[in-house]
Image (spheres, rainbow, N blue to C red):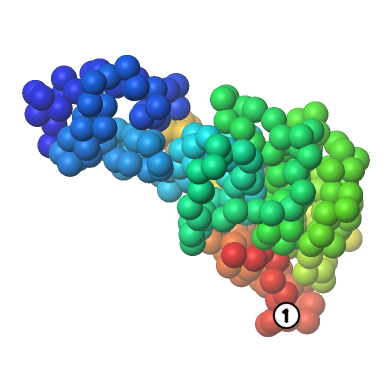
């Protein structure tokens, strides 16, 4: 619980724009270490990395995926680390196959002789890392977007690389640049398939996850972001059409409908009108939520609805 003393101590702390409080920014304070110990003891600050703190009430108010983003920046705040994999993806703002990965990844550079501790939640990578594969984003040293996608593919498989690649293609990153970055890199056998099918037209990570499943598992192909006429003749965009059929697929994720309750009510109202009009036009619309997609139920249901053989044993699309 905050007290007058802890409130005074907290007011002396310097916060970065992302909300992190770094001990190295407080070397001018007498007994800075004691100040941080007091604030942590009273629950005012939470330590989320070496010499890295955040206000407890703000940290606990964050959803899991935002906590991961903040923790990635905390990991990268230690000298000598280059964020990689999902940690670099968090800083770059790339889509993730897993909203909350189980670990952070780094490369190690010069640390002045100090040892970097790793463990189940911090993995050190040892592949060659040329200087041109490293960049700085908001003060964080990270792998470039291209190298991040290559590392995600090598570390976590097709799904991680595909989802991140779809996000990257929405900016000025090209498939050729990603492919060039992968030269002489081991463990990226899936990368050619990723670069062949990744597309910038998708609008969410959930769409990228589902498209990646259809590419990786096979059975049927889908066309993303197609337009279909409603009952009034107005054309509506739908997430996917199964190629060669009149079957359409719509994926529902919470973020798709807005950031706050008022916006969600407005968008959901429009979505209901849209759905009603498509239903009157007899558009065969298959709807799936987040859990159905990530647990492969959406993919399996579409196999069944299309009259295709079931696939009870799917290959691993994402590695832990």
Q: Residue furthest front?
A: 113
Which residue is more in the foreground, 243 or 210? 210
In the rendered structure, the answer to whether residue 124 lies left or right of residue 313 reads left
- Count of residue discs: 1
- Residue drawn at x 84%, y 49% is 182
Q: Residue furthest left?
A: 4
In the depicted structure, whether residue 188 falls above or below residue 56: below
In the depicted structure, whether residue 293 falls above or below residue 19: below
Which residue is more in the foreground, 276 or 59? 59
In the depicted structure, whether residue 192 falls above or below residue 19: below
Q: Point out residue 105 in the picture as x, y percentages from the top left corner.
A: 59, 50
For mark 1, what is the residue? 311
- Residue drawn at x 81%, y 48% is 198
Based on the displayed image, in which of its 4 quarters is residue 129 positioned?
top right
In the rendered structure, the answer to whether residue 23 lies left or right of residue 268 reads left
Q: Point out residue 155 in the picture as x, y percentages from the top left corner.
A: 68, 59
Residue 63 visible in the shown view: yes
In the rendered structure, the answer to whether residue 126 lies left or right of residue 46 reads right
- Residue drawn at x 26%, y 32% is 33
Q: Point out residue 108 in the picture as x, y percentages from the top left corner.
A: 62, 45
- Residue drawn at x 72%, y 61% is 157
In the rendered structure, the answer to whether residue 37 lies left or right of residue 224 reads left
């Amino acid at each position: 619980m905050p007290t007058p003393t802890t409130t005074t101590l907290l007011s002396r702390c310097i916060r970065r724009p992302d909300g992190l409080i770094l001990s190295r920014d407080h070397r001018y304070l007498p007994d800075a270490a004691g100040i941080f110990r007091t604030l942590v003891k009273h629950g005012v600050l939470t330590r989320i990395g070496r010499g890295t703190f955040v206000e407890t009430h703000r940290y606990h108010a964050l959803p899991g995926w935002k906590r991961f983003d903040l923790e990635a920046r905390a990991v990268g705040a230690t000298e000598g680390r280059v964020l990689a994999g999902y940690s670099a993806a968090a800083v770059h703002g790339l889509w993730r196959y897993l909203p909350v990965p189980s670990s952070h990844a780094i490369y190690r550079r010069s640390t002045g002789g100090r040892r970097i501790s790793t463990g189940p939640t911090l993995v050190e990578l040892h592949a060659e890392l040329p200087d041109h594969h490293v960049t700085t984003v908001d003060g964080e040293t990270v792998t470039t977007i291209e190298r991040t996608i290559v590392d995600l593919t090598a570390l976590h498989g097709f799904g991680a690389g595909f989802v991140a690649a779809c996000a990257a293609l929405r900016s000025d990153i090209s498939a050729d640049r990603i492919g060039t970055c992968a030269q002489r890199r081991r463990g990226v056998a899936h990368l050619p398939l990723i670069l062949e099918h990744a597309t910038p037209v998708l609008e969410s990570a959930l769409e990228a996850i589902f498209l990646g499943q259809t590419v990786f598992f096979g059975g049927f192909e889908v066309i993303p972001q197609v337009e279909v006429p409603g009952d009034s003749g107005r054309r509506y965009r739908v997430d996917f059409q199964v190629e060669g059929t009149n079957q359409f697929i719509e994926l529902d994720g919470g973020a798709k409908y807005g950031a706050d309750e008022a916006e969600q009510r407005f968008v959901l109202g429009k979505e209901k009108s849209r759905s009603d009009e498509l239903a009157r036009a007899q558009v065969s619309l298959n709807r799936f939520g987040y859990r159905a997609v990530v647990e492969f139920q959406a993919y399996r249901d579409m196999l069944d609805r299309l009259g295709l053989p079931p696939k009870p044993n799917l290959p691993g699309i994402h590695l832990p």
